[in-house]
Amino acid sequence: MSRGFESHALRIFICTACINEGTSVSDQLRPRSSRSRKLATIARHGRLRRSNPFIALAKVLAASLAVVLVSGVSVAAIATYDVAASVQPDVKLANETAGPATSIDAIEGGVNLLIVGSDSRKGQGEAFGPEDSTGDLNDVTMLLHISEDHSNASVISFPRDLYVPIPECPDPEGGTFDSMSSQKINTTLTYGGLACTVLTVEKLTGLSIPYAAEVQFNGVIAMSTAVGGVPVCVAEDIEDEYTNTYLEAGMHTLEGTAALQFLRTRHGVGDGSDLTRISNQQVFLSSLMRTVKSADTLTDPLKVYSLAKAVTANMSLSTSLNDVSTLASIAVALKDIDLSKVVFIQVPTGTVDGGVEAVEPDFGDLFAAVAADASLQLGGTTGGGATVDPNAPVVAEPDPAATVDPATGEVADPAVPDPAVTDPSTTVLSDSVTGQTAGELTCSVGRTLDDQ
């Protein structure tokens, strides 16, 4: 007799590439107590539930249809579970939202989804070193916000060295970890896992975050390969002996390990800081989004499936996301948002001893605008790790004759927006908030060994 059937359910998801520069726990996490010392051994526990094979088949069919419907999705890629063995245990969050009824319609209302990149080497292969060579730090922490009317979206990056208060967090093994007044945000994955990172960002921003996902190295390697590579522009040579990244100025199509190392490089871009690494990552992510939305990708079912398969084997989802209809509904909400309305943002920070801290009131104003569901418009530059592509198509300036006020005969200043046509729902952010839209063509600002 068979021992039963494992569920081979396809699941759809959107995942922004989350990569991190490998650093050891000893470099970034100093022990504070005997309680702290046991954190490196935290394990997440969960069981894969066995399901009725007919229900599993229904999920496969629903998910397959969802792939077709949401294949124009932006932000990163469609991800899929196709075998039960690739499904990781759910992560229970404090503020989870029940998913919609089984459907493939756009999810109702706005969405806040936290995407965390782990630097854990566990299960990532020998190329990244021994499994115990690092702890489990969230070197990349990004918040995806989709507006309630599904007309715009933002992807907000928090620097790994940002000092934040960490609230009391549940211990996956039972009990709780004490709150702390000021620690780097990238230690939160060590304190209680993904759920603790979510609680910390909720406390920091005042937002409720009902969805979350944790991603690892190999997902990005497979995802960049699945689309046939991601074209990136390099303004100056990039040289980084730590990630073995050496790129001459010009255009490069990156896939596999080369794409991963490009995203991990810190020493080879900007001023060598994590802040300029974030803007370098935005160059890649915006190009990845344009690639995913292109006809070459969307008309190729194998690429769509490969994108789906690439990410999920390296992803741990919150219980609220681990559902076909929820994942597909979020994808549908994203798929028709114009690239110019998807904004990549780096939170405003100032340098302090050993890291950075939020700059107020700009930091608070940013998340007040997110909470108000405003369409966000950047007031600052692309950030130190990126610059505008000099070969980008030039947008024609408006004809001054077309801006003459018929009542006064005066020519309007094109630099001053007309209050009558300005969208009242748009919030122009402080110039301390850097980033770019997914539609902007940018280049990475390289850094050679001579400057390091």
Image (cartoon, rainbow, N blue to C red):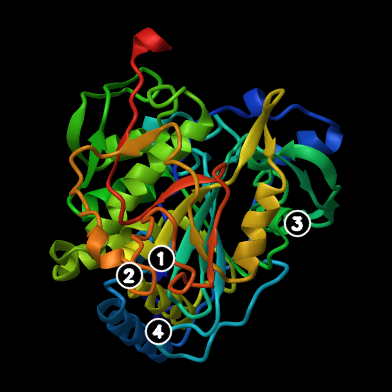
Query: Mark on residue 118?
Result: none
Q: Residue at x 54, y 44 (%)?
A: 431
Q: Which mark sits nearer the N-terminus, 1 or 2?
A: 1
**Which of these two is toward me, 242 or 62?**
242
Query: Mark on residue 56?
Result: 4
What residue is shown with label 3?
203
Q: Which mark sits nearer the N-terminus, 4 or 3?
A: 4
SS state under label 4: helix
Does the CB distance between marks 4 and 3 fall below 8 Å?
no
Q: Residues within 10 Å of mark 1 (few under 14, many from 20)?
A: many
Q: Which mark sits nearer the N-terminus, 4 or 2?
A: 4
Give how far across and how far down residue 123 sits, in percent.
45, 44
Displayed quadrant of residue 403: bottom left
Q: Residues within 10 Å of mark 3 (few under 14, many from 20)?
A: some
What residue is shown with label 2?
73
Q: How many marks?
A: 4
Q: What whole-number distance in Å separates the C-alpha atoms at marks 1 and 2?
A: 8 Å
